[in-house]
């Protein structure tokens, strides 16, 4: 393995893996290192939002994700044996031409990571496990990083996807403002349980003791066990501890935890990095923002950070102006601020209901420096329509891949590295894409520019 690379990705959670995969399919040089000796085993971030599924479609992993994942089953809430109510966390929705993946999909985080790793391997990429970043320094040309293995790596850029306790963020001295809810801890583990079915999420609530929820993990014989702990309570990360919490809150002798496979104690932190970039070093995912797991936003926001950054980094490596990297923080920091607010609100309301806001389909980059023209910055939705020669197409098929796409209702303009398509029945996509003759769609699926001027289109592409 060469100790010179274009991008050193530090941390192989979902954020680092998504970035590695995006760079790999673009043929960019990178290495991805993780301090853990082996792959992560826990179910942690288990809700994949509709927008993330669209990204996974683009990255070529959607079939594996959907084949092994499941829609959340209904939740049955009880006090002891007494049923209180039953409801769904997510409204049932059918796919539409604009939103092909409308339902949140349950997938244990370890499997999402495995699917991303397997896809990365198809491009020849591999995570280097047991390779901890110890220190780094940067100069005008690159970053020199030292690993615990003793190796020194020289990279043009370093991306810290090293989680909430990010060494990269701390080394840069970037502030991580916010709060730690010291009194709020959540016991979370993967368990095997007897005495309950797998067709429901089971929740028990006991006044004075609290809540315990068992999520049947898609495609496994395990449950994710989630129990907020009361302030000051002694915690127990052992099988006996989990049994005690369940017994106290469910009052059921018939339900038994038989095995504990993974366990953690989650401290609620609500924090955001002051900056996402310092020179040649960038932050993404939990390294840049952490919040309550309520609403299932963390993993999803990290995946989208990486997806926003991947194409920009690749273009800068290919000679685009470095200022393109500034748009990463400009676009993603407001999203993190929004997500922090949303997840805190859901956490504090203790609401189990989820809606459009948590699906991340409405998030976009309107008004940003990369958005020009009506609707620019909006997510570019899927649609079924026809090319000018009558061929039926799905827009996501045209967008899939690392390129920019031009949709046009007039003569097709040609640019290097850009795919242009003349749409024969523009009226089918007018609601989403407007009336201008050309719509430029970014590699990460947002409308960059709407214009009727081919010169304006050329100028925009030259700029990025
Ligand atoms: C109970 C719970 C439920 C959750 N539910 C959801 C959910 O439903 N949906 C959702 O979107 N999110 C959820 N989350 C949040 C989600 O798990 C995280 O947001 C997500 O894992 C962040 O991904 P990441 O890649 O940014 O960081 P991480 O997954 O933390 O990965 C960081 C990686 O960096 C490595 N690393 C750290 N330091 C170094 C170093 N110095 N050198 C090399 N490697 C290093 C670590 O070993 C690790 O592999 C949940 C979290 C919890 C705790």
Image (cartoon, rainbow, N blue to C red):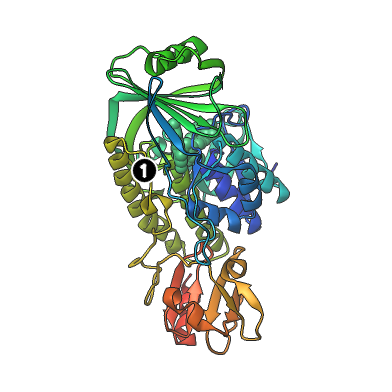
- Please state, as top left, top right, bottom left or bottom right, where the N terminus lies in the image: top right
Which residue lies at the image location 28% right of the left edge and 42% below the top edge?
345
228 or 258, which lies in front? 258
Which residue lies at the image location 38% right of the left edge and 54% below the top edge?
356
| Residue 96 pos. (x, y %) | 51, 64
91 or 362, which lies in front? 91
| Residue 428 pos. (x, y %) | 50, 79
| Residue 329 pos. (x, y %) | 38, 54
Q: Is residue 384 above or below residue 361?
A: below
Q: Residues within 10 Å of mark 1 (few under 14, many from 20)?
A: few
Outermost top residue? 240
Q: Is residue 150 left or right of residue 163?
A: right
Does the beta carbon at disc 1 come under 8 Å from ligand 1?
no
| Residue 332 pos. (x, y %) | 39, 54
Q: Is residue 404 left or right of residue 332?
A: right
Q: Is residue 46 above or below residue 395?
A: above
Q: Is residue 88 left or right of residue 13?
A: left
231 or 444, which lies in front? 231
Outermost front residue? 82
Inspect this view and state whether residue 390 appears: yes
Inspect this view and state whether residue 134 appears: no
Element under label 1? loop
311 or 238, which lies in front? 238
| Residue bearing the label numbered 1 | 353
Which residue lies at the image location 53% right of the left edge and 24% below the top edge?
196
């Amino acid at each position: 393995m060469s100790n010179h690379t274009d991008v050193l990705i530090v941390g192989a959670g979902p954020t680092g893996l998504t970035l590695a995969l995006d760079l790999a399919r673009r043929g960019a040089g990178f290495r991805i290192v993780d301090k853990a000796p082996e792959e992560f085993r826990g179910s942690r971030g288990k809700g994949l939002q509709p927008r993330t599924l669209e990204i996974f479609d683009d990255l070529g992993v959607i079939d594996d994700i959907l084949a092994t994942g499941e829609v959340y089953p209904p939740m049955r809430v009880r006090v002891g044996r007494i049923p209180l109510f039953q409801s769904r966390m997510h409204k049932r929705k059918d796919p539409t031409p604009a939103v092909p993946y409308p339902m949140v999909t349950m997938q244990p985080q370890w499997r999402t990571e495995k699917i991303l790793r397997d896809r990365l391997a198809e491009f020849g990429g591999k995570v280097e496990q047991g390779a901890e970043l110890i220190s780094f320094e940067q100069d005008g040309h690159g970053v020199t990083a030292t690993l615990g293995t003793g190796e020194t790596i020289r990279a043009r850029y370093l991306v810290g996807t090293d989680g909430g306790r990010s060494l990269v963020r701390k080394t840069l001295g970037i502030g991580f403002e916010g709060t730690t809810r010291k009194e709020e801890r959540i016991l979370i583990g993967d368990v095997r349980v007897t005495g309950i079915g797998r067709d429901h999420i089971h929740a028990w609530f006991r006044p004075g003791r609290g809540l315990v929820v068992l999520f049947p993990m898609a495609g496994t014989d395990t449950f994710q066990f989630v129990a907020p702990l009361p302030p000051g309570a002694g915690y127990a990360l052992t099988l006996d501890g989990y049994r005690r919490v369940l017994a106290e809150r469910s009052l059921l002798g018939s339900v038994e935890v038989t095995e504990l496979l993974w366990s953690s104690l989650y401290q609620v932190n609500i924090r955001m990095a002051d900056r996402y970039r310092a020179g040649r070093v960038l932050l993404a995912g939990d390294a840049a923002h952490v919040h309550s797991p309520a609403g299932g936003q963390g993993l999803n926001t990290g995946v989208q950070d990486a997806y926003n950054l991947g194409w920009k980094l690749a273009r800068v490596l290919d000679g685009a102006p470095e200022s393109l990297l500034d748009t990463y923080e400009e676009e993603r920091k407001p999203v993190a601020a929004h997500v922090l607010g949303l997840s805190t609100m859901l956490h504090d309301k203790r609401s189990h209901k989820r809606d459009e806001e948590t699906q991340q389909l409405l998030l976009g980059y309107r008004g940003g420096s990369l958005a020009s023209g009506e609707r620019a910055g909006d997510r570019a939705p899927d649609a079924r329509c026809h090319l000018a020669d009558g061929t039926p197409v799905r827009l996501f098929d045209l967008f899939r891949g690392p390129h920019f796409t031009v949709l046009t209702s007039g003569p097709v303009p040609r640019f290097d590295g850009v795919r242009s398509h003349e749409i024969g029945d523009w009226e089918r996509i007018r609601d989403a894409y407007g009336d201008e003759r050309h719509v430029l769609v970014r590699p990460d699926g947002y409308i960059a520019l709407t214009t009727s001027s081919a010169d304006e289109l050329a100028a925009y592409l030259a700029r990025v």
